[in-house]
Protein backbone atom coordinates (compact mmCIF):
# COMPACT_ATOMS: atom_id res chain seq x y z
CA UNK A 1 0.00 0.00 0.00
CA UNK A 2 2.79 2.35 0.93
CA UNK A 3 4.65 1.70 -2.31
CA UNK A 4 1.49 2.44 -4.28
CA UNK A 5 1.22 5.81 -2.60
CA UNK A 6 4.85 6.53 -3.43
CA UNK A 7 4.30 5.50 -7.05
CA UNK A 8 1.21 7.65 -7.29
CA UNK A 9 3.04 10.63 -5.82
CA UNK A 10 5.95 10.07 -8.18
CA UNK A 11 3.79 9.96 -11.27
CA UNK A 12 1.86 12.99 -10.07
CA UNK A 13 5.00 15.03 -9.57
CA UNK A 14 6.33 13.87 -12.94
CA UNK A 15 3.11 15.02 -14.58
CA UNK A 16 3.42 18.38 -12.83
CA UNK A 17 7.05 18.74 -13.92
CA UNK A 18 6.07 18.00 -17.51
CA UNK A 19 3.33 20.62 -17.35
CA UNK A 20 5.62 23.24 -15.85
CA UNK A 21 8.27 22.72 -18.45
CA UNK A 22 6.18 22.29 -21.55
CA UNK A 23 7.28 25.71 -22.80
CA UNK A 24 10.75 25.40 -21.36
CA UNK A 25 12.40 22.09 -22.06
CA UNK A 26 15.71 22.40 -20.25
CA UNK A 27 17.09 19.37 -22.08
CA UNK A 28 16.88 21.35 -25.32
CA UNK A 29 18.15 24.67 -23.98
CA UNK A 30 21.85 25.28 -24.50
CA UNK A 31 23.76 25.34 -21.25
CA UNK A 32 26.03 28.17 -20.31
CA UNK A 33 29.43 27.34 -18.90
CA UNK A 34 30.35 28.45 -15.40
CA UNK A 35 31.98 31.86 -15.54
CA UNK A 36 30.77 32.64 -19.05
CA UNK A 37 30.07 36.34 -19.50
CA UNK A 38 29.35 38.99 -22.09
CA UNK A 39 30.38 42.61 -21.67
CA UNK A 40 29.89 45.85 -23.52
CA UNK A 41 33.53 46.83 -24.01
CA UNK A 42 32.63 50.17 -25.54
CA UNK A 43 31.08 52.65 -24.93
CA UNK A 44 31.64 52.87 -21.19
CA UNK A 45 28.73 53.23 -18.81
CA UNK A 46 27.85 56.93 -18.53
CA UNK A 47 29.55 57.90 -21.80
CA UNK A 48 28.34 60.99 -23.63
CA UNK A 49 28.53 60.47 -27.39
CA UNK A 50 28.11 62.79 -30.33
CA UNK A 51 26.77 61.13 -33.47
CA UNK A 52 26.67 57.42 -34.16
CA UNK A 53 27.44 54.98 -31.36
CA UNK A 54 29.97 52.22 -31.99
CA UNK A 55 29.23 49.33 -29.64
CA UNK A 56 31.87 46.64 -29.09
CA UNK A 57 30.88 43.28 -27.65
CA UNK A 58 33.10 41.20 -25.40
CA UNK A 59 32.71 37.56 -24.42
CA UNK A 60 34.61 35.20 -22.17
CA UNK A 61 34.20 31.55 -21.28
CA UNK A 62 32.21 30.79 -24.43
CA UNK A 63 32.73 31.34 -28.16
CA UNK A 64 30.91 33.46 -30.71
CA UNK A 65 29.44 31.49 -33.59
CA UNK A 66 26.89 32.44 -36.24
CA UNK A 67 23.22 31.54 -35.75
CA UNK A 68 22.61 27.96 -36.84
CA UNK A 69 26.13 26.83 -35.96
CA UNK A 70 26.49 23.56 -34.07
CA UNK A 71 29.72 24.67 -32.42
CA UNK A 72 29.62 23.62 -28.77
CA UNK A 73 29.53 26.22 -25.99
CA UNK A 74 28.85 29.06 -28.37
CA UNK A 75 26.28 31.69 -29.18
CA UNK A 76 25.73 35.01 -30.89
CA UNK A 77 25.22 38.44 -29.42
CA UNK A 78 21.87 40.17 -29.01
CA UNK A 79 21.59 43.81 -28.06
CA UNK A 80 18.70 45.08 -26.00
CA UNK A 81 18.33 48.81 -26.68
CA UNK A 82 16.24 50.74 -24.16
CA UNK A 83 14.77 47.42 -23.12
CA UNK A 84 12.35 47.22 -20.27
CA UNK A 85 11.88 43.49 -20.21
CA UNK A 86 14.28 40.58 -20.44
CA UNK A 87 13.74 37.89 -23.06
CA UNK A 88 11.83 34.85 -21.94
CA UNK A 89 13.76 31.75 -20.91
CA UNK A 90 13.63 28.90 -23.37
CA UNK A 91 12.07 30.99 -26.14
CA UNK A 92 13.78 32.40 -29.24
CA UNK A 93 14.40 36.12 -28.94
CA UNK A 94 12.34 38.26 -31.29
CA UNK A 95 12.51 41.74 -32.73
CA UNK A 96 12.76 43.45 -29.35
CA UNK A 97 16.49 42.75 -29.54
CA UNK A 98 19.00 43.27 -32.34
CA UNK A 99 20.42 39.93 -33.50
CA UNK A 100 24.02 39.55 -34.58
CA UNK A 101 23.50 36.15 -36.19
CA UNK A 102 26.53 36.55 -38.39
CA UNK A 103 28.72 36.34 -35.33
CA UNK A 104 29.47 40.09 -35.34
CA UNK A 105 31.27 41.52 -32.33
CA UNK A 106 30.50 45.17 -32.95
CA UNK A 107 27.86 47.41 -34.45
CA UNK A 108 27.19 51.09 -35.16
CA UNK A 109 23.91 52.50 -33.91
CA UNK A 110 22.18 55.72 -34.88
CA UNK A 111 20.21 56.66 -31.78
CA UNK A 112 18.02 59.64 -31.02
CA UNK A 113 19.42 62.35 -28.77
CA UNK A 114 19.10 61.66 -25.08
CA UNK A 115 19.69 58.79 -22.67
CA UNK A 116 19.70 55.18 -23.81
CA UNK A 117 20.36 51.87 -22.14
CA UNK A 118 22.21 48.97 -23.73
CA UNK A 119 22.53 45.35 -22.63
CA UNK A 120 23.98 42.27 -24.31
CA UNK A 121 22.35 38.86 -24.16
CA UNK A 122 23.94 35.75 -25.61
CA UNK A 123 21.65 33.43 -27.55
CA UNK A 124 22.29 29.98 -28.94
CA UNK A 125 22.07 28.83 -32.56
CA UNK A 126 18.27 29.10 -32.34
CA UNK A 127 18.33 32.59 -30.73
CA UNK A 128 17.30 31.12 -27.37
CA UNK A 129 19.07 32.49 -24.27
CA UNK A 130 21.32 29.95 -22.60
CA UNK A 131 20.53 28.47 -19.22
CA UNK A 132 21.70 30.17 -17.04
CA UNK A 133 21.21 33.34 -19.09
CA UNK A 134 24.42 35.11 -20.14
CA UNK A 135 23.77 38.85 -19.98
CA UNK A 136 25.92 41.94 -19.57
CA UNK A 137 25.48 44.77 -17.14
CA UNK A 138 23.05 47.40 -18.37
CA UNK A 139 24.92 50.55 -19.42
CA UNK A 140 23.42 54.01 -19.83
CA UNK A 141 24.77 56.40 -22.43
CA UNK A 142 23.79 59.88 -23.54
CA UNK A 143 23.69 60.82 -27.20
CA UNK A 144 23.98 64.53 -27.86
CU1 LIG B 1 19.67 35.76 -32.60
Image: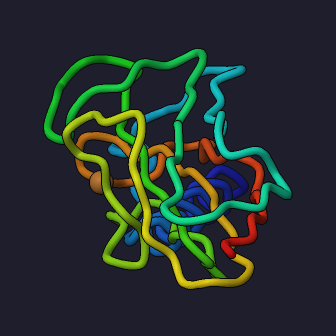
Q: Nearer the viewer, residue 70 or 79?
A: 79
Taking the image in four quarters, ligand 1 sits in the one at: bottom left
Up-down relation of residue 84 to residue 67 (above or below): below
Q: Position of residue 49 (x, y in %)?
A: 68, 60
Q: Position of residue 8 (x, y in %)?
A: 57, 65
Q: Quadrant of the N terminus?
A: bottom right
Q: Residue at x 77, y 50 (%)?
A: 137
| Side of 10 relative to 47 (left or right) | left
Q: Residue at x 18, y 25 (%)?
A: 70
**Furthest residue in direction right, as rendered:** 46
Q: Nearer the viewer, residue 127 or 107?
A: 107
Q: Nearer the viewer, residue 144 or 29?
A: 144
- The figure's colour scheme reads rainbow
Q: Position of residue 47 (x, y in %)?
A: 79, 55
Q: Residue at x 39, y 48 (%)?
A: 107
| Side of 90 relative to 144 (left or right) | left
- The quarter of the displayed image where residue 131 is located: top right
Up-down relation of residue 25 to residue 57 (above or below): below
Q: Quadrant of the C terminus?
A: bottom right
Q: Residue at x 57, y 28 (%)?
A: 58
- The quarter of the displayed image where residue 66 is located: top left
Q: Position of residue 115 (x, y in %)?
A: 74, 79
| Side of 118 relative to 140 (left or right) | left
Q: Nearer the viewer, residue 38 or 55?
A: 55
| Side of 65 relative to 107 (left or right) | left
Amino acid sequence: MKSMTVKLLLSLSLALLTLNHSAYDKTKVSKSLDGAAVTILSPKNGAVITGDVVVKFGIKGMDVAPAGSDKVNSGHHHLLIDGTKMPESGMPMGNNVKHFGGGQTETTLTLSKGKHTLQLILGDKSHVPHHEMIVSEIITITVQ
